[in-house]
Image (cartoon, rainbow, N blue to C red):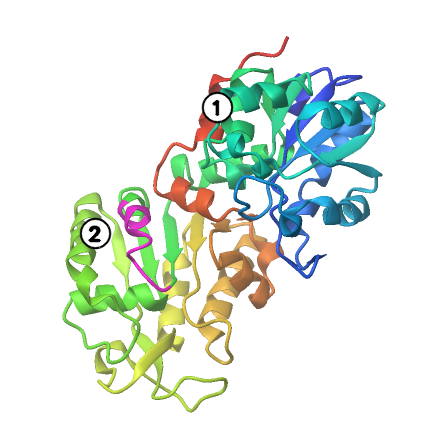
């Protein structure tokens, strides 16, 4: 990967178009998780301290190509100011005369946020005319939104072909972490993958078994692999029609020298609910009238054993129904084991995608991994080995003037 970063530009007095991902969780106009906002602060600090005029661009939700009040970014300015420690003015559009007037009024060190990019259909269609209208607003384009990098939109891909372009500190950190975890990792590499279904992660699993040394499977997807081996899974979540695909992945793993490890024991029950009566049994002995909802203590010990001596861990997805006690135990203990080894300096740990961040936060160890990505779809597409348009554009962008 060769791309410019914030450090490569003379920013003083320049107007910077900063693509951020402010598509944050919110309820009734209140942000419920500020992680994505907080992680932008190093980039904002650098821009402010170096005298740039910062214009923040973002999408929010899925509007249908016109103004919709529920998807306006206006409510975010309070949270941005609290996190970033600077005033943030708001523009009621992201292109046009009003946006241009606000941007031209900025002084060095000031920050503004423009309205939702997706209020214009040209954003998602990567329309050249819309992209040129955005480009008129600034001198330099900085992409700090890895979580939107799997989309070839005007603000994530198009702008890079019209302006001097670089990565923000969050994008840079994400790309370095992911590169070190899968493209040039310290070995042995253990991948821990959970979640409900293999059908949504077929490409992920197919790519991983070609690149990692050990793949530990949990969650519902482990049941599909067990079923493919002829093991009774009872009423457990299982994609019976994906058995052939599971067998293909197991064959690819064997040919690639990757060991697939499945749970050796399970937490089982008849009727699901918080603190529902449950037992632990060997994986091969799950009764036909019960379902598995978590990995058992032997499986946790097995995973710990596989982690011993590992140098890199890549984690995606919970290993059980972590949202409901006590069926969060398997995910919690596995996450704490990885965190413990990371803190001890023996392991590089990278996690992300889907419910992974929530699961690690629930376990109380999200801040103890080497890197936890807030990206969902982009993280999974990277795990599939796909080229992300927003990242490719950084490599192909116009050089700094």
Q: Is residue 368 left or right of residue 251?
A: right
Upstream in the sequence, badge 1 or badge 2?
2
Q: Secondary structure at mark 2?
A: helix
Residue 104's place in the image compared with 176, above or below, is above
The residue lying toward the viewer, choosing from 112 and 1, is 112
Numbered label tally: 2
Magenta residues span 196-206
Say which mark, if any, is on residue 393. Answer: 1
List the residue tagged with mark 2.
249
Q: Residue at x 38, y 64 (%)?
A: 303
x, y percentage for residue 236?
29, 76
Q: CA distance from mark 1 to mark 2?
A: 32 Å
| Quarter of the picture holding the C terminus | top right
On the image, which quarter does residue 250 sit in? bottom left
**Few, some or many residues within 10 Å of mark 1 (<14, 14–19, 20+):** many
Residue 198 is a magenta residue: yes
Tell us which disc is closer to us: 1 or 2.
1
On the image, which quarter does residue 230 sit in? bottom left
The residue lying toward the viewer, choosing from 10 and 341, is 10
Residue 179 is a magenta residue: no
């Amino acid at each position: 990967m060769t791309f410019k970063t914030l450090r490569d530009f003379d920013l003083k007095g320049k107007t910077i178009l900063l693509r951020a991902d402010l598509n944050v969780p919110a309820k009734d106009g209140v942000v419920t998780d500020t992680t994505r906002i907080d992680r932008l602060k190093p980039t904002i600090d650098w821009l402010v301290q170096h005298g740039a005029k910062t214009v923040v661009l973002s999408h929010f939700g899925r509007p249908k190509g016109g103004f919709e009040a529920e998807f306006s970014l206006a409510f975010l300015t309070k949270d941005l100011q609290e996190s970033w420690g600077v005033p943030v003015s708001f523009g009621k559009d992201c292109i046009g005369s009003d946006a241009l007037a606000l941007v031209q009024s900025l002084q060095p060190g000031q920050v503004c946020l423009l309205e939702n990019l997706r209020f214009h259909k040209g954003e998602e269609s990567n329309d050249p005319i819309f992209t040129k209208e955005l480009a008129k607003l600034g001198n330099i384009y900085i992409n700090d939104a890895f979580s939107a990098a799997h989309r070839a939109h005007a603000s994530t891909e198009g702008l890079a072909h019209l302006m001097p372009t670089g990565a923000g500190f969050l994008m840079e950190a994400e790309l370095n972490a992911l590169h070190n975890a899968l493209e040039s990792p310290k070995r042995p590499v253990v991948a821990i993958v959970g979640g409900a279904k293999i059908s949504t992660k077929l490409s992920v699993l197919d790519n991983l078994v070609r690149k990692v040394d050990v793949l530990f499977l949990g969650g519902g997807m482990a049941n599909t692999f067990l079923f493919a081996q002829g093991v009774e899974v009872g009423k457990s979540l299982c994609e019976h029609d994906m058995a052939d695909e599971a067998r293909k992945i197991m064959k690819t793993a064997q040919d690639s020298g990757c060991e697939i490890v499945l749970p050796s024991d399970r937490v089982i029950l008849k009727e699901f609910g918080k603190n529902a009566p449950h037992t632990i049994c060997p994986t091969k002995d799950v009764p036909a009238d019960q379902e598995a909802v978590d990995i058992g203590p032997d499986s946790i010990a097995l995973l710990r054993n596989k982690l011993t001596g590992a140098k890199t861990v890549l984690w995606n997805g919970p290993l059980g129904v972590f949202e409901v006690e006590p069926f969060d135990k398997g995910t919690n203990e596995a996450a704490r084991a990885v965190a413990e080894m990371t803190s001890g300096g023996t392991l590089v740990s990278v996690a992300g995608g889907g419910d992974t961040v929530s699961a690690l936060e629930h376990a109380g160890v999200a801040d103890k991994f080497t890197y936890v990505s807030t990206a969902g779809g982009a993280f999974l597409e990277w795990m599939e080995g796909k080229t992300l348009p927003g990242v490719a554009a950084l490599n192909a962008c116009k050089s700094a003037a």
